[in-house]
Amino acid sequence: MADPHAHDRLIATLGAGLAPVRRLRPPWLRTLGWLGVVAAIAVALVARYGTAPMLARWAGAPDLGWAGLGAVLTAITAAWASFALGVPGRSTAWAWLPLPSALLWTGASGLGCLRAWIAPATHVASVPEAGDCLFFILGFSLPLSALLILLLRRACPLRPVLTAVLVGLASAAASASLLEICHAFDAAATDLLLHALAVAMVVGANAALGGRLLSAGAGPRAG
C-alpha cells in the first residue's frame, strides 16, 4: 500500500532548498532610480559651469534646445523600455518607445548645420575639440551603461541583445544631455559627426557586450 504521506514529504523536500524571490519594482520606478544618478551628475556639472551659457545658446539657436530636449527624452524612454523588456511577457513593442524622441534629437541636431549664424556663446569646434566631445560621451556612457546592465541582470531579460541596444541608447542620450551643460560649440558638421560616432560606438558596444552579460544573468527571473 502506498504511503499516504509520500507526496507531502516529496513536496516538502523539493521546497526546502528554495529561496524566496523578491519581486522587482515597476519599470518606471527603476527608471527613476537610474535617472537619479544622471541627475546627480547634472547637478555637479551645473555647479561647475552654471546654466547661463547653455540657456544663452538655446535662446539664440532654438534648434540646440530642441536637440537637448530630444536627448533627455530619449534617455528617459530608452531606459524605461529596457526595464520594461526585462519583465517576462512584455511586448517587444516597448522597443519603439524612444523612437519619437530620438527622431527629435537627431532631426533638431541636423538643423543646426543649416543655420547661417553661430549660436551665442559658441564657436565652431575644431577636430580636437569635437574629439573631446566624443570622449565625454564615451566616458559618461560607460558607467551609466554598467549601472543599467547591473540593474537589469536581476531581471534576466528574455531579449538580451535588444535590451542591451536600448541600454546603449539610453546611456548615450543621457551623456549627450549632460554634455549640453558644458558644450560651448555650435552644431557644426564635424562636431555632430563625432557625436553620432560616439552614440553608435556606445550602442554597438552594449549590443555586443551587454547582450552577453544580460543573457548570462544569474539573477532569478521576476515579474
Image: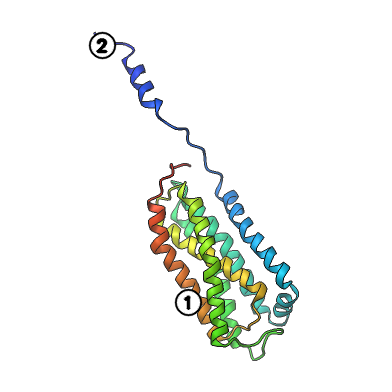
Residue ID at (67%, 88%): 118
Q: Secondary structure at mark 2?
A: loop
Of the image marks 2 and 1, the number of the one nearer the N terminus: 2
Residue assigned mark 1: 197
- At label 1, the amino acid type is Leu
Q: Quadrant of residue 123?
A: bottom right
Q: Nearer the viewer, mark 2 or mark 1?
A: 1
Residue ID at (48%, 55%): 149
* x and y, in percent, of residue 72 in the image: 61, 66
Residue 2, labelled with which disc? 2
Q: Could you tell me if residue 84 is visible in this image?
A: no
Q: Is residue 125 found left or right of 47 in the rendered image?
A: left
Q: Is residue 63 found left or right of 55 in the rendered image?
A: left
Q: Residues within 10 Å of mark 2 (few under 14, many from 20)?
A: few
Residue ID at (58%, 78%): 109
Q: Could you tell me if residue 63 is visible in this image?
A: yes
In the rendered view, tell whether residue 144 sits above or below residue 48. above
Q: Are marks 2 and 1 in contact (CB under 8 Å)?
A: no
Quick one: 133 or 62, which is closer to the camera? 133
Q: Quadrant of residue 133?
A: bottom right
